[in-house]
Image: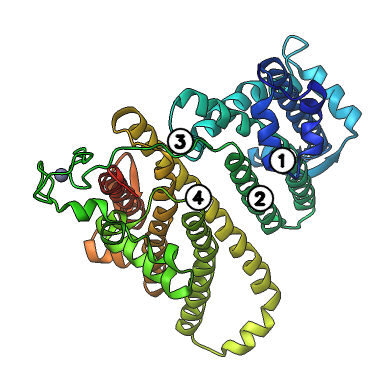
Amino acid sequence: MQNYPSWLRVLCAPAIDLFRPRLAAKCLAAASRPAFVAIFLLSLLAYAVVLICLILWDSTVTQIWVPAQSTATSTAPTTTWAGDWEVRERTIGEVWRDWRASAFKGWIGTAEITLALVLILGPILVLLLGWLNLPLVHGTGSVWRSYKRSLRAGTAFLWPLTVLTVACGTVLILAVHAGFRGFSGRPLWLVSISSATCVLALWLRRAVRAVASGEPEQTLPPRCEGCGYNLTHQPAEGRCSECGLALDDSLVAWRSRLGSAWARQKSVSSWVRTVCDVLFRPRAFYRAIKLRTPPAAAEAFAAWNYVLLPLGALLWTVVLFVLALLKESGPKWYWIISELPWIAWNAVYICAMILFGLCWCWLGQRVLAALVVSWWLARQPLPDFRWAVKVMAYETAYLWTFLFYWGALRASFVLDEMWISKLLGIRYVTVLGSMPVEFAVFLFGTLGLVVIWLWRYRIAHRAIRWSNF
Ligand SMILES: [Zn+2]
């Protein structure tokens, strides 16, 4: 008989576990099915209510186009376009009455459509989150059971999402309303949304870790690292009878799997060495890491990548700014001092954009990893899928190649914005519609890097699948 947490505990979880993602995920994972369904629907409903309230508030201040009063003497047709944007303010009650008045057939209005969208898109989001986090949750055994745990952790994600939607929505609405009065709040809401996304990603990471597979390590027969031949009965000649690889290369830890430089010793130099090993010698690197140890070291390596990547991007932006400044003629210091508020405002904007870009990189990396692991689950099984978590963590180093590619491209545009067009002698290319050559180089270069990434996962899979350590 399974021991379920009480209904009261489950229903109160959004309030008491908001800042405790691990407990939130554990509570939902252990909840009985009816209690889980109830809290899932309530969470969706709460999100819809929050969204409707925000839209109501947002609609209290709008801009409407007021045509100019035509005078008796004017006959020219251009006067019909004359007019001005005017700020119109309404109370929340008035907005609500207007919604009701304009509702389709009297009852399908903005509020009902918002509710329907949340009830349709919310479950889709949770299903996708369950899939996205499956590689971090699954170990051995039933994939379906792992997916259910991942799904429940994804449901808890709706709670911080609701709170941060209130916070970001408030900033966004205030910025939009202020925008009607001529104030640009764009950097402010970009900062709030990108930092909220980072907080959500961290929250989800902790929640998912709490429901990750805790099954004990299986006892697997010793395998040949080259071909997977079962080495329980060792051939007398000291070599694999299938592929000829020396037995010691498979069965002696210090000869076959020493662990990554970072796992052996955590220092700046070992981090750099590990990044270089992952990037330039993936086969040798994955043949040397230990798979059956806890993933803490690999995850710390990934975390450092995610800290250093935005810092690298920021440093590169500063270098580009200085380069652009040197290209300009005239007194620079005077310009910098006189334009300091503008520069500071743009610095905030750029930091927000970098954080935003980081969130997209994170999402891209996770989606690709989820695709790869899904493929492995279906077609190329691993003895234990916790090994895939290590590959995913070390592969974050590959994000540096994207940073270098985009950074180099951006830098070349600072020096000469049109150099690719000039070099090729064309301005536009037609692939799925016409696009500027510069954009095509950016887009297809990035896609090329993604294809290489998929190939790298294949290399990693081949190097780890018969691991003995
Ligand atoms: Zn062999």
- Residue carrying label 2: 199
Q: Position of residue 262 (x, y in %)?
A: 43, 65
Amino acid, disc 3: Gly
- Residue carrying label 4: 362
Q: Work out how far the residue at label 3 is from the one at label 2, CA to CA, in angstroms.
A: 26 Å
Residue that appears at 49% across and 61% down = 305
Q: Quadrant of the N terminus?
A: top right
Residue that appears at 65% across and 65% down = 348
Question: What is the number of the mark on residue 177?
Answer: none
Give the structural element (helix, strand or loop) at label 1.
helix
Sort mark 4 into few (<14), some (14-19) or many (20+) by Cα contacts within 10 Å. some
Q: Position of residue 71 (x, y in %)?
A: 80, 39
Q: Work out how far the residue at label 2 is from the one at label 1, CA to CA, in angstroms.
A: 9 Å
Mark 2 touching mark 1, by CB under 8 A?
Answer: yes
Give the structural element (helix, strand or loop) at label 2.
helix
Q: Is there any visible trace of residue 437 in the rendered image?
A: no
Sort mark 2 into few (<14), some (14-19) or many (20+) by Cα contacts within 10 Å. some
Label 3 vs 2, first from the N-terminus? 3
- Residue carrying label 1: 160
Quadrant hosting ligand 1? top left
Amino acid, disc 1: Pro
Amino acid, disc 2: Val
Q: Work out how far the residue at label 3 is from the one at label 1, CA to CA, in angstroms.
A: 27 Å
